Amino acid sequence: MDEALLRSLTPTVLGILVRRGADFAAAEDAVQDALVEALRVWPADPPRDPKGWLVTVAWRRFLDATRADAARRRREDLVDEEPAPGPVPAVDDTLQLYFRCAHPSLTPSSAVALTLRAVGGLTTRQIAHAYLVPEATMAQRISRAKRTVSGVRFDQPGDVATVLRVLYLVFNEGYSGDVDLAAEAVRLTRQLAAAIDHPEVAGLLALMLLHHARRTTRTAPDGSLVPLAEQDRSRWDTTSIAEGVQILQTALARDRLGEFQAQAAIAALHADAPTAEETDWVQIVEWYDELARLTDSPIVRLNRAVAVGEADGPRAGLAALAALNDSLPRHAAVAAYLHERDGDLATAARLYAEAAHKAPNLAERDHLTRQAARLNARRCR
C-alpha cells in the first residue's frame, strides 16, 4: 500500500468534490472515508486508476451522508452530478484549496490549523507542536473550525498572509518532522509567486530554497542529525542557494520588509559563509533584532540568544536566554550548548539529557542523548 500516493491524491480529490457542490467539511469527511476504504481494499485489489477510484468512492460517501439530510431536492441534484466511471482529468487544486480554507469566517489561526489538517496532510499532533499548544487544545480548535465552515460555500477565498503561514508550517514540518512535505510546499509557493507579485511571497520562496539547499547534509547515512556547523558545505545545492539569494535581493529592494524576508536574510548569511567559523554572526544578530520586532516571537528570541552567544560570547548568549521562559521548546538544548561553550560541562550534560527527554522526534532525541553522553565521557577522563 503506497500511503504517499494516497496523501498526494487527497487535495485533488477534495478539490473535485468541492467544485461539484460539496461543502468543505462534508467533502473532507467523505475523502477520509474513501482513504480508509482504500487502505482496506487496495492491498488485495489495487485499482487501475487510483484517483478515479478515490473520486468515485468519496463522492458516494458524500451522497450517503447527504441522503441523511432533509434537503431531498438538493440531494437529487447532486446524484445527477455523480462523475462517470473512468479516468479523471489531471487538475491541481491544492493552492486553490489553501485559499478557500483561509475563509473570512475563520480566524487566521483556525484557518491555518484547518488547512494543515484537511489539505496539508499533517496530524493534529504535528499541528499542535507547530503552534506550541497541547494536542487536545489543537483538536478542539480544528473541530470548532469545521463546525464554523460546515455548510459554507467556499466562494470567498482568504488572504495571502494566512496562506503563507500555512505553506511555511507545511514546509517546516516536511523539513524537520515525520512527513515529507517540504518539496510540495516549495512547489506550491513557486505557483503562488508566479501568480502574485508580493514581497513576502518572494521572501518565503527564498527562505524555502535556502533551507532546502542544505537538506541532504542535515542527516548522516545512519539517520542521525548533523548540526549546521558540521555539515559538508560542498554538498549544499548551490543552484538553489543562488536562486534563493537572487529572489531575496529583489524582494528586499522593494523596502517592504516582512518576517519571511528577514528569516531568508539569516538563511542567506549562513549559506554565504564558506565555513561555520566565517559566519557573520554580528549581522545575523541584527537580522534577528528585525525579526523580533516584526513578530515578537519567543522562538525568534530563543534563536537570537544562540546568535548572540556566537557573536558576543556564550555568557552574553546566556544573559539573553535568561529573559525567556524555560518552558519554550528547545530552551534546554540552547542552554546546554551555551553552557558547554562556556566550559560548564556538568551543567551542559544535564541540560542535554533534559532536552533529549523533551525532544519532539526520535532523531533529535538521539542527537541530544549523544551530546550528553559525549560530555559525561569527557568529564570522566
Image (cartoon, rainbow, N blue to C red):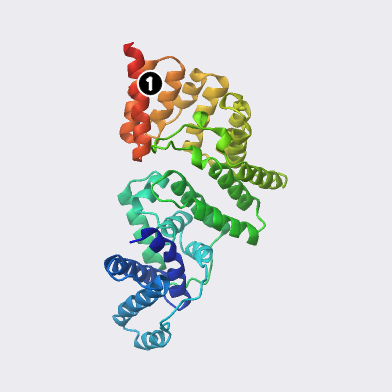
User: For the residue marked with disc 1, what is the amino acid?
Assistant: Ala
Number of numbered markers: 1
190 and 150: which is toward the camera: 190
Residue 349 horizontal side relative to residue 183, left or right: left
**SS for callout 1:** helix
290 and 93: which is toward the camera: 93
Q: Is residue 224 visible?
A: yes
Quick one: quadrant of the C terminus? top left
Q: Position of residue 371 (x, y in %)?
A: 37, 25
User: Badge 1 is on which residue?
Assistant: 348
Quick one: quadrant of the N terminus? bottom left
Q: At 49% from the left edge and 18% from the top edge, which residue is drawn?
A: 315
Q: Position of residue 37 (x, y in %)?
A: 29, 69
Q: At 40% from the left edge and 33% from the top edge, which residue is drawn?
A: 330
Residue 327 is drawn in which quadrant? top left
Q: Position of residue 113 (x, y in %)?
A: 42, 55
Label 1 packing within 10 angstroms: few (<14), some (14-19), many (20+): many
